[in-house]
Image: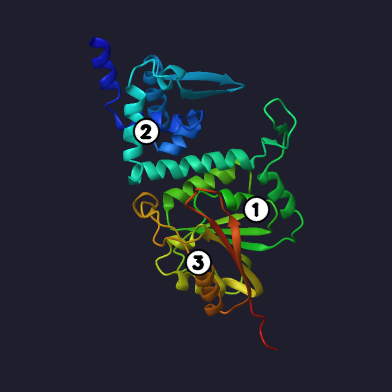
Amino acid sequence: MKQASALYRLLGDEARLRLLRVLDRDRFNVKELTGILGLAQSGVSRHLGLLKEADLVVEDRDGAYSYYRLAPSLRDQERGPLWPLLEAQFNSESSSGTLKADEARLQEVLRLRRENFEHVGPDTRDGRQLVPGRSWAAWSRALGLLLPPLDVADLGCGEGYLTVETARWARQVTAVDRSTGVLARAKALAARKKCSNITWKKGELEKLPIDSHSMDVALLSQALHHAAEPSQALDEAVRILKPGGRLLILDLRPHDETWVRDKLGDRWFGFSDEQLTALLTRAGLTDVRVTIGARRTNDPFAVVLAVGTKRLRKK
């Protein structure tokens, strides 16, 4: 009875139940679990330690990392009906905002693993060929080397990951975000990466603190769905472009994941190809193209790309 009482107390915590649900999908390290659950790393480590002590979770060492997964005895029903009961509860709550957010972030972690090209092709014992050093990040940097030095605006820059990558090939990057805290983290990242060609500015997408006709390229990466007025944000993006300059948008296609409004602050649930085409055309851009950026089976989020060119001035 004491063991049962201790087990029930252990499972009487939402975070630990969410951990077990995620670990049923795959093995993850602490950093990945922190991102999936949106919890502090110290808290995730503490919960994992308790679950490990209860023999519900096991730890595997792989190089410099520790990965955690469900204990085989839990799934094999050596613990009696515990896992079927937990699984039934997880399934019944799968439509809740918290679990849908966990699932979306879990899919993003798995996507990043795949896009690092850790394994491709058939050859090794598990049917995949190891290709060290191949990644989308490396390819994006390589393609950036083909571009001429340009003045680029990263609008809604967030924590600066795209800003830093752009700074590798751009002449100058001007990064704008509405959050002082987010900008501080972005500046710290740029300092660690030794990027000195970035200017940071606080401002709104609908009223950019950038001079007119000063940018060769304006980027809106996963930012337009945060704008209060998307059409006004696009007008501002076009205003700061030089004649012949280009606006590039990376955003989401329409989806039904309404939890992103509370969890992520999204104001719009994506944009259709027709919506983006109309918005960019109305903003005065020409040569507008809209295409799919990325889509995965069973993933509620599909990425859409859009590009347009600002008209040249009439002579």
- The circle drawn on residue 272 is 3
Residue 141 point in image, percent of width and height: 70, 49
Q: How dense is the environment of label 3, judged by Cα within 10 Å: few (below 14), some, or many (20 and up)?
A: some
N-term mark: 2 or 1? 2
Q: Which sits earlier in the primary sequence, circle 3 or circle 2?
A: 2
Residue 295 in picture, x, y percent from top left: 56, 53
Give the amino acid at mark 3: Ser
Residue positioned 56% across, 49% down in the render: 296
Does the residue at mark 2 contact the one at mark 1 (Cβ under 8 Å)? Answer: no
Which residue is denoted by mark 2 in the rendering?
Answer: 18
Residue shown at the point (49%, 59%) measured from the top left:
223
Q: In which quarter of the image is the N terminus?
A: top left
Amino acid type at circle 2 is: Arg
Residue 181, visible in the rendered structure: yes
Is mark 3 in CB contact (under 8 Å) with mark 2? no
Residue under label 1, please give it. Answer: 167
Q: Distance between the residues labelled 2 and 1?
A: 38 Å
**x and y percent of residue 266 in the render?**
40, 57
Q: Neighbour class for label 1 at 10 Å: few (<14), some, many (≥20)?
A: many
Secondary structure of the residue carrying tag 3 is loop
Query: Is residue 220 visible in the rendered structure shown here?
Result: no
Q: Which of 46 and 301 is in front in this view?
A: 301
Number of residue marks: 3
User: Front-most of 239 and 75?
Assistant: 75
The local crowd at label 2, few if under 14, some if 14 to 19, many if 20 or more residues have their Cα within 10 Å, is some
Residue 226, which numbered label?
Answer: none
